Amino acid sequence: MREPIIEFKDLTFRYDAQKNPTLKHIDLTINRGEKVLIVGLSGSGKSTLGNCLNGLIPFTYHGEMSGSIKIKGKETRESSIAELSKMIGTVLQDADGQFVGLNVGEDIAFALENDNVELDKMHKAVDEVAKLVDMQDYIEHSPMELSGGQKQRVALAGVLVDDVDILLFDEPLANLDPATGKTAIELIDDLQKKTDKTVIIIEHRLEDVLWRHVDRIVLIRDGEIILDDDPDKVLASDILLESGIREPLYVSAAKFAGVKITPDMHPSDIKRFTLSEDDKKKIFDWAKTHIETPVDDREILLKGEDLRFSYDGKKTIIDGVSFEVKKGEMFAIIGKNGAGKSTLSKLLVGFEKEESGKIYLEGRDIKDDTIYERGKEIGLVLQNPNQMICNTMIFDEVAYGLRNAHIDEDEIKERVEETLKICGLYEMRNWPISALSYGQKKRVTIASILVMRPKIIVLDEPTAGQDYRHYTEIMEFLEKLNNDGQTIIMITHDMHLMLEYCDRCFTLVDGKIYFEGRPSKALVDKEVTEKANLKMTSLYDLANIVKMDPDDFTQSYINAERSMRHAGN
């Protein structure tokens, strides 16, 4: 029997700036060597729970606390934040925010330098932990030269070097592409097995975390723990969906087909997921009834021909890209970081000029259009709304582009109010933007582009960092715009988003289009997923279990999911 290493007893915490507690009567015991996944919606209290563990509460974030938190038998309030950092190491979702050294070696050594460790011992410890996270060949590299996955490995090494007992990961997958996220989960699992450290993962991308085994799933809702159980029992229930957490796709597909999920089927692990022959037939027959895909005969709205671009005249970023986007289409551009996706979006909106090739909008070459003229036709919404917002009030932010275009104020009022109604923001039109949630800010930035009445909206990672409920709110809003005829191009790492909402996609690999076609086909092709740093979804595995073509099966799921979603609306 493993001994407890973390004990919450009747813990309640309220931030000074808030009226009501964020955490309420938390009772939770985590044993030494366990790997625990904490899930919940944004604002549910899961990150606050993590901050209570690593000492940010109460030492940095102040508030009223009652109850008890013990780590290794000692009350956290009786320890300093420095003492707690020797027991629990935190890896943040934004690795850039954790770097303090000029190179990888310095960054890993930071904690040892603070403890005045002898130089020889320090070098030995840094070398050992760098090997543990497979970064020994990057000791002299600047952290800013590294990929997202490599940065996370360095951040992890920086806490491992202190030989902490507990590793806390706060949304480790938020900024990673699918393949890198998969590698990160494998790394965490391998380290836990090698070191037997206690691992706590706070994350809402449930299926991605379950790529490797976890001992327990803790579900937090409105500041309370409503479930703490074995993953198979959790997945066999409907409580995740009821709480706004996305189930793994293979579980959803089996439930769509009418299969009764039980814990002994091991639903938390696709590699162990056990189906009877009757269940397999039920899923196969269900999928066969949903394969039909309508023929798309819409006219071409946007066309790129043999586009090429380089920032420095030496390294080619966009290399002979040709594509077509149809009117009223929701289209996805996918590929790993650095593939050229964002650069291509800059060419489309005119922020950069292609070195060769042509871009046609409704058959017209738009090469000589100014950025202003291009912006009226093609609008770009950045990933982070805070990078776009430049006004204090909602109405003024949405009106900003129209005022710069010297539109009459009466027409501005009419167009802004009409757009705010479409975006579900009309009742808040006189609010300060500071009063909005992240998702609502995202809507404001979309409204500020939509009010210009562009023919195409380009969105860079529209759902990044959003839990399933907020993700769904944003995507249902975009889908409504699309159903009303708005053409939408999305740059995304989210394979679920692409499957569920997009008509077609293309993958960029080293500045070239490697695949163009249905999203379902892209994610069942091993060569495409490897080249573009994607990850085949669990629908591929379930298709093989029921002996059906993975592309047909995935398309069946998409069709069924869309039908259910539209029926619900």
Image (cartoon, rainbow, N blue to C red):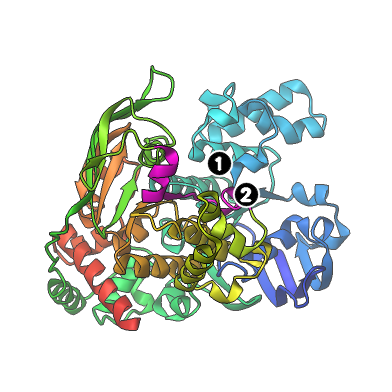
Magenta highlight on residue 8: no
Are there few (<14), some (14-19), or many (20+) residues within 10 Å of tag 2? some
Q: Pinpoint residue 529: horizontal percent, then vertical percent.
A: 28, 45
What residue lies at 58% left-to-right and 62% top-to-bottom?
A: 438
Instruction: Give the mark, 2 or 1, whose residue is nearer the N terminus.
Output: 2
Residue 336 located left or right of residue 199: left
Q: Pinpoint residue 431: horizontal percent, then vertical percent.
A: 65, 69
Mark 2–mark 1 CB contact (< 8 Å) = no
Can you identify the residue that label 2 sits on? Answer: 92
Q: Nearer the viewer, residue 400 or 489?
A: 400
Q: Which quarter of the rendering shows the N terminus?
A: bottom right
The residue segment tinted magenta is 370-390
Can you identify the residue that label 1 sits on? Answer: 152
Q: Nearer the viewer, residue 509 or 163?
A: 509
Amino acid type of disc 2? Answer: Leu
Magenta highlight on residue 379: yes
| 373 in relation to 558, above or below | above
Residue 179 located left or right of residue 319: right
Q: Pinpoint residue 464: horizontal percent, then vertical percent.
A: 48, 55
